[in-house]
Image: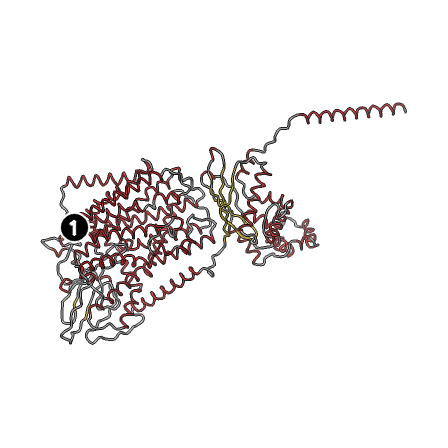
Amino acid sequence: MNKKVFILFVLLTLAECVRLTSRQNIKSRAREPRTRIYRPRGAVVEDLFNVYDPSFLAIVWPKISNGVHLFVESTCWRDLSVFFRDLSAGRAWTYSAVDASGRYQSGLFRGNTLWLGSRDECLHLDNRFTSGEGNESYNEFHNSDYLNAVLKKEKYFDGETWRSLVQKDELWRRLVLADNSPPYRLAYTAVQLSLNLTRITMAEAYSITLGVCLPQSCSPEDIASVINFSIMINDNLKSNKTMPRIVRITSLRQIEEYYSINKDIGAILLICVTALLFAIAVTATAVDLKLVKCSARNHKSMSFDLEKFNNRNLDSEHGNLNDEKKKHNCDIIAKKDTNVVDMETLTINNINNSSNINLVTVKKVTKPNVMPPSITLDVVSMERVTGSCKRCGKYKKQCNSNNPRLSDNLPACPRVKSFASLTTEPKRKDKFFKSLLLCFSLSYSWRRIFNVNMANKDLSIIHVLKIVATFWIIFMHVAMIANYVSENGGDINDHNNLYYIIATGTLAFDTLFFVSGLFSSHHFFFLKSQYTVEELVSFGGSCGQVLQFICFVTNRAIRLLPSYVYVIFLSGVAARVTRRTSPLSLPEAEHATCDNYWWRNVLYISTLFLHEDQCMQMSWYMSVETQLHVFGALACALSSTGRRLVLAIAVAAIIVSTAADVSAAYTEFDHQFSSVYALYAVWIERPLARVAPYFVGMFVGWLVIRLEGRMHLSKLRVSVLWLVTLLALVSSLCTAWVFREWVSSWLHVLWPLALLWPAIVSATTAAELTRGILSSPCVAALSRLSYSMLLLHGPVARLLMLCAQVALCSHTVCIWWYFAGTTLVTMCGALLLSLLVETPCCSLLRRLSDYAS
């Protein structure tokens, strides 16, 4: 007994000692200072870019209440509660929704700012609800004996996979469908974020595009509240306020699978206009090709035989003249595509207004006092038409004096008026409307586009320059869009490849302005050298000169307007389509500006307003080019009274505009640019910089007319001029790589001066060698389609790239592939636009002018 008491006493003593020792250890640990336990560095970096964390939201969601911690609508709160509850429970549909949402991806500092997730996965998940697949409640299986009954079969699977089990067992199939189907509608939303990592070495705000898949009942304001709440708890709870960053939501857009045009009046109107133009074109083509016969009444004084178009007989020989038939072939000054004067032959006896004057059958007039037709704009008498001298080019001085008949082209003849102007009898209504209808014939428009009989073949190099500049501009704009929306765009301030593309791309616009000024002055002075003011506008004196100036300006503006208006509405519709269906976006707000400010484009005054309110990327070019055309035409009109004064004013305008542009460039080019579009607005859209190229081009056009195809210079002078030209061209292309940015503003003067000598040589001494360039129908067509390509390539590039639903790349190979695809589609679209709108409207205006005179 004593032994037992002793052992018990020893055990109690040992227990008490152990208890006292443990207390002392606890007190000693309490006196020691606590050390902060840092999270692993990888987790901290991951949290630095974590914006929307649905897994962490699912943990804290049961502990928060609506109206206290965040503010969302009641329906959105209910659906979000179901979403986060099912996510914690492991429901399959929530995993798909989380997987469809975007998250941080490596490569942010190299331009990977697109955290898009999967739009298709989110919309496919939404379609599972709308299609009725598996909409049965998951609780039906969870709270009943169905699930337990099926789960008991697990031990009898005998190696079969769950897929085969689902196919064989109806209960399993229903369970899987219910688990993979959402209980409500889902929507994919693109969120634009500004992520600023506030460190000395990372003091830059990155524009992030985040895609989230959330309930459709949540409005953009609700989604913004959820994301801001996720950012707050990530910065304060999860990271314990250790992340130095600022995240701000800039915009939200709910992305649809397909664009609905039910409420888009502009899209409906555009479709109706396109369908109407197509129907008219088909009808006119059927009438033109004699598939539909349209009878015409015979005139008592004169009848005309209807014949089909025959574009192959542009250079047919002169036939024998008799009492009833005459054959005449004559080059015609007609179509001028963006100040391009085309030579075209018209069939006098053809109501179809074909491109050739093939056969005229004229009955003898019984009235002895029939007066010949009056001479109006682009109309010459028969004596001038029937000249037998063939020419080498535009000027007879270029012909071989020994044997002038060796050349291929006919004498330079202005356009003969259409068949209606050759009769003195009243025009009948059936012929009038039929002639207007045939302007929309696809066959006629096709021949006009691919017609190689152009008046200014001596300016073939200038046509090539226009084509090259057009493709150059398309390449630059494609590279801009690819860089802005790509996952590896990089920083534009790093002087990367795109920086140099834009820096040298400004020369492409200078080339276009140079070409435009050249063609404009060349056309003006050629008409002035061939006709008097009375022949052009039927008025003389000061009133006639003023009227000639007004007609010269308004003719171009009205001629370009139909295609321009059509593309304006097309750009607005394309912008709305991409905005509603693509998570990618551009800084241009054409979905709103084209609806609100389209009238500024129509009046060619868009450059007088803010850049943010601009509709279409090329609208600034159209406005500046039209405004310069007005001042250039005024200078040409005043040159007859004071040539030296006009030259002095033009030189002063070039000097003043260049000085103003250089001073502005000195302050603007050194700034940091937020995106490639900001750089484009500063480098390219400079109206003052385009004054010098345009007026230099006008001087070249006047000089070509004055030289009349001949230029006599020594070989030494020619060699020196070519050497200076090559040095100017090379230095202009290399300036962006060598000198500071503002120095490049001097290129707007140097580049057109470098083009001056090749333009003059190609129109004079080397005209015979270069004239064959325009003998190719493809080159002639590209020259005519350049205007439509400039208008269309913007909407085409937007649709092709933004609707691709994949992240683009901005590498050189990728950009060239995008350029090839965009150019091919643009050329096809430009051909259709020219066939349906541009060429028919030009022909229609010409016919109306003929009838009015």
**Residue 415 visible at all:** no
Q: Is residue 388 left or right of residue 573?
A: left
Q: Quadrant of residue 316?
A: bottom left
In the displayed structure, 21 sits above or below 664; it is above
- Of 195 and 49, the residue lying toward us: 195
User: Are there few (<14), some (14-19), or many (20+) residues within 10 Å of tag 1?
Assistant: some
Q: Is residue 171 left or right of residue 411?
A: right
Q: Which residue lies furthest to the right in this view?
A: 1
Q: Which residue is drawn at 15% across and 51% down?
A: 708
Where in the figure is residue 629, as x and y percent of width and height? Answer: 27, 52
- Of 316 and 752, the residue lying toward us: 752
Q: What's the colour scheme?
A: secondary structure
Name the residue type under label 1: Arg
| Residue ID for mark 1 | 706
Q: Is residue 20 left or right of residue 501?
A: right
Q: In this view, does 477 lie to the left or right of 34?
A: left
Where in the figure is residue 491, as x and y percent of width and height? Answer: 42, 39
Q: Quadrant of residue 479?
A: top left
Element carrying mark 1: helix
User: How many numbered marks, from 0 up?
Assistant: 1
**Residue 395 visible at all:** yes
Q: Which residue lies furthest to the front in this view?
A: 542
Q: Which residue lies furthest to the left in this view?
A: 402
- Of 702 and 42, the residue lying toward us: 702
**On the rendered image, what quadrant is the N terminus found in?**
top right
**On the rendered image, what quadrant is the C terminus found in?**
bottom left
Where in the figure is residue 224, as x and y percent of width and height? Answer: 54, 47
